[in-house]
Amino acid sequence: MRRYIIMRLLWVIPVMLGVLVIVFTITYYTPGDPVMAKLGADYDQEQYDALAAQMGLDKGFFGQLVSYIWNLVTKLDFGKSYITNLAIKDEITARMPVSFGISMTAFIIGLAIGIPLGILSAVKQYSVIDITLTASALFLAAIPGFVLALLCLLLFGVTLRWLPVSGLTSFKHLILPVGTSVMGGIAAMMRMTRTTMLEVIRQDYIRTARAKGLREGVILRRHALKNCMIPLVTVIGGAMAMTIMGSVIVETLFGIPGMGLYMTSAINSRDYSVVNAIVLIIALVICLLNLLVDIAYAFIDPRIKSFYVSPKKGNANDAGTDSDSVRKAGGGA
């Protein structure tokens, strides 16, 4: 198991390198010149060359790419913003807790609501509750996140004026961003839980557990839900990744000073160094989430864990068992 985790961690390196090269290439060849954007209309060639050298943009594509990778690997330095000239690492460090807090809150609420509703829908199959929950989940899954966020903003913030529409200074400011972020995750987890629960509760061992007189709650928790966890963990990891990526839209619409708003502002002002850094961090988080999902598979299902045991260790155990059996046979003779 340890070897498997190490190998997966090593695979993160080429993935991150590939993401870095692709994003850097796209931003490099995107129309627009950060030097001209910072200088404005009135400048001469000498000023342009001096500022380009100061910003590290006087080199060619490969020179800038190698310099960027070297600073990132050796110093963990994302560089400075082209517009504000502030260190990107400091800006991300200040904004990351905001984005992480909103994403984790939405994720935990989605787990606490989506899975129980999916179980309830499966247990009450074809009832009014099941039809209502299934229709609601389909609606939430079909509507785009930014459309739902805009509708909630217009209804609860502008029309009814129940909730603030921007900023992050009180608990009320969290309701709309977290609420709109969590809806898609609830729909995905509820639908997957219902589907897998319907498959499991029809199995023979569930009928045997009922025949033994076990309570329905015990059967659902200890037998049914445990065997639903493999597909559920996959959906949970995907929901967490979508929540993190959706923070860009949510923070921009609600004016929350997190990484999403920082990235949107960087795109609008052609601050490509900031864009590269945030995309790289999002890719790293998604890679780590996928790693955690794969590790969770092994802990949920022991059969999966057995595939990661070293063959030498297994052969040694077999050899020890064979020698013990021969010794016992000889002693009996």
Image (cartoon, helix red, strand yellow):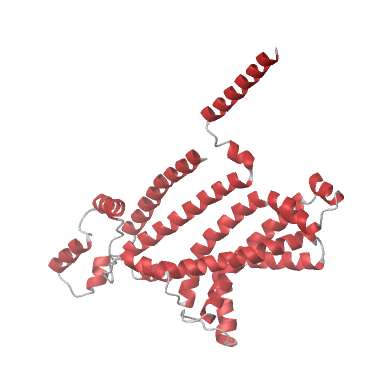
Point out the image quarter for the C terminus.
top right
- Residue that extends furthest to the top in the rendered view of this protein: 333
x, y percent for residue 197: 73, 54
Tell me what residue is drawn at x 75 percent, y 62 percent: 121
Give the vertical position of 59 relative to 247 (above or below). Answer: above
x, y percent for residue 83: 28, 70
As drawn, is 39 to the left or to the right of 26?
left
Give the vertical position of 312 relative to 56 (above or below). Answer: above
Q: Quadrant of residue 116?
A: bottom right
x, y percent for residue 3: 48, 38
Give the vertical position of 258 relative to 309 (above or below). Answer: below
Tell me what residue is drawn at x 28 percent, y 55 percent: 75
- Residue that extends furthest to the left in the rendered view of this protein: 46
Q: Is residue 154 visible?
A: yes
Give the vertical position of 247 relative to 27 (above or below). Answer: below
Q: Quadrant of residue 150?
A: bottom right
The answer to which of 209 and 165 lies nearer the viewer is 209
Tell me what residue is drawn at x 51 percent, y 70 percent: 102
As drawn, is 62 to the left or to the right of 261?
left
Q: Is residue 271 visible?
A: no
x, y percent for residue 26: 36, 56
How many circles with numbers are drawn on the protein? 0
- Residue that extends furthest to the front in the rendered view of this protein: 331
Tell me what residue is drawn at x 49 percent, y 68 percent: 101
